[in-house]
Image (cartoon, rainbow, N blue to C red):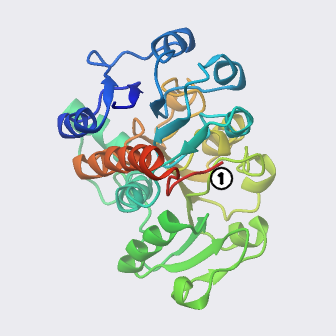
Amino acid sequence: MKKKILVTRKLLIENEEKLKELFDVKLNSKDELYTSDKIIELSKDCDGILSAITDQFNKDLIEKLSPSIKIIANFAVGFGNIDVNAAAKKNIVVTNTPEVLDDSTADISILLLLGASRKVLEARRAAELQNWKWSADFMLGKQMSNKRLGILGMGRIGRAVAKRARGFNMEIHYHNRSQLPKDLEEGAIYHKTVKDLFNCSDFLSINCPATKETNKIINKETIAFLPDNVVIGNAARGDVVDDEAMIEALKSEKVFAFGLDVYNGEPKIHPEYLKLNNIFLLPHLGSATKRTRWDMAYRATQNLEDFFSIGMAKDKVN
């Protein structure tokens, strides 16, 4: 008998067809954003759940899940939406989808820096008015080439960002919990502290995971460590940035421009960001290529298949 799986969000057709081959699936054909109560109700006769980053599996929800639920396969590289400790206490395995979205997220990281530094939002607004006039000092941005790039979080995505930045002849600096082996550094310069990294970052790419340690790591104190007129891009998680401190820095032009793909409380955006010109906003597109989304769903499906066939999943995080 096939195991029964609740799929909380609509996936690409090819991925859903594969799931139907392997499991008895409950699909979300209307792509509703299920409430906690709805997830509990729909999963009560299921063996596992294929969740999305938009689902908040907090302690209360997990404790109310049916005892039949043995695995939550998250359709994301992150798993901050799931209380993994509560899941572990209930003997529920949690998995993610690492590696498959490194390139697409690194592409977006570079786009955030380029879009912000070249005033793309302000330029778009000027073009739409159709009355702009060229001059030698019209819409001057900052050039990325031959500058120092600081990368906060030199994991797989951070290293993919560094690879792309070398095409701009940028000098790569980074901060991690620990220094990388030389073959992975590829000439990048390690800094033991955030302060040391920020001191020498003309551009800063945020690619660290969301943890207790990184929560609001970009704040009034740490922004002060950065050079004046720095350009910052955040393709990590919204909660690594103190929005009030960032908005103040943007208004004072301590920060030349800020590119965001992630937000605190998304899809809501702090209203003050929307009033600024030195901002470049994207609606969480880091993994939004067809190839990447297919790979993510395939990886989540593989985790489910492995768990139920051999009793273990490659991407177990708890």
Residue 240 location, quadrant: top right
The x, y position of residue 309, in whole percent, is 42, 48
The x, y position of residue 313, in whole percent, is 50, 52
Q: Is residue 71 visible?
A: yes
Determine the residue positioned at 67% across, 65% down: 227
Determine the residue positioned at 34% across, 47% down: 120
Q: Is residue 286 visible?
A: no
Question: Mark 1: which secondary structure?
Answer: loop
The foreground one among 171 and 313 is: 313
Relative to 88, residue 47 above or below: above
Determine the residue positioned at 54% across, 32% down: 273
Question: Dot 1, crowdedness within 10 Å: few (<14), some or many (≥20)?
Answer: some
Residue at far right of view: 221
Report the amino acid beneath label 1.
Lys
Determine the residue positioned at 55% across, 23% down: 271
The foreground one among 148 and 72 is: 72
- Answer with left or right where residue 272 lies relative to residue 12: right
Residue 107 location, quadrant: bottom left
Relative to 155, residue 29 above or below: above
The x, y position of residue 294, in whole percent, is 27, 47
Relative to 78, residue 208 above or below: below
Relative to 181, residue 275 above or below: above
Task: Identify the residue under disc 1.
Answer: 254
